[in-house]
Amino acid sequence: MKKDIFISYSSKDNSFVKKLAKDLTSKNIKVWLDKLEINPADNIVKSIGEGLSSSKYLLVIISPESIKNPNWITEEWSTKYYQEVNKRTLC
């Protein structure tokens, strides 16, 4: 399913991100959030790649926690960047 926004964040910011996702959803914005989209038996990397591909925008939550451990966030934004470059839609 196509989503409007993929949210990339540190798991330590989970409570803030859950509220943000709820607020966005209440405004009819379709949100891709790992906690809602990835099932225990799913391949995490594949699911994230599909989520990034099917989302119009990437929202990166930058916080003290995400700066301390930026691994997943860096992977997610760089993947989305390269997807957009490959589609030649990057402005």
Image (cartoon, rainbow, N blue to C red):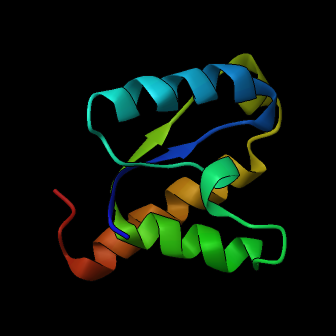
Residue 52 in percent (x, y) is at 47, 65
Counting from the top left corner in percent of width and height, residue 20 is at: 50, 24
Q: Is residue 62 above or below residue 55?
A: above
The residue sitting at 64% across, 19% down in the picture is 16
What residue is shown at x 27% (from left), y 28% (from top)?
27
Q: Nearer the viewer, residue 36 or 78?
A: 36
Check the picture and name the quadrant holding the N terminus. bottom left
Tell me if I can see residue 51 in this picture. Answer: yes
Residue 30 coordinates in the image, percent (x, y): 35, 48
Q: Position of residue 63 (x, y in %)?
A: 66, 21
Quarter-wise, where is residue 65 in the image? top right
- Res 29 quadrant in image: top left
Residue at 16% x, 56% y is 91
Q: Is residue 75 left or right of residue 27?
A: right
Q: Looking at the image, which is closer to me, 87 or 46?
A: 46
Above/below status of 76 relative to 45: above
* Above or below 51: residue 76: above
Q: Residue at x 50, y 66 (%)?
A: 51
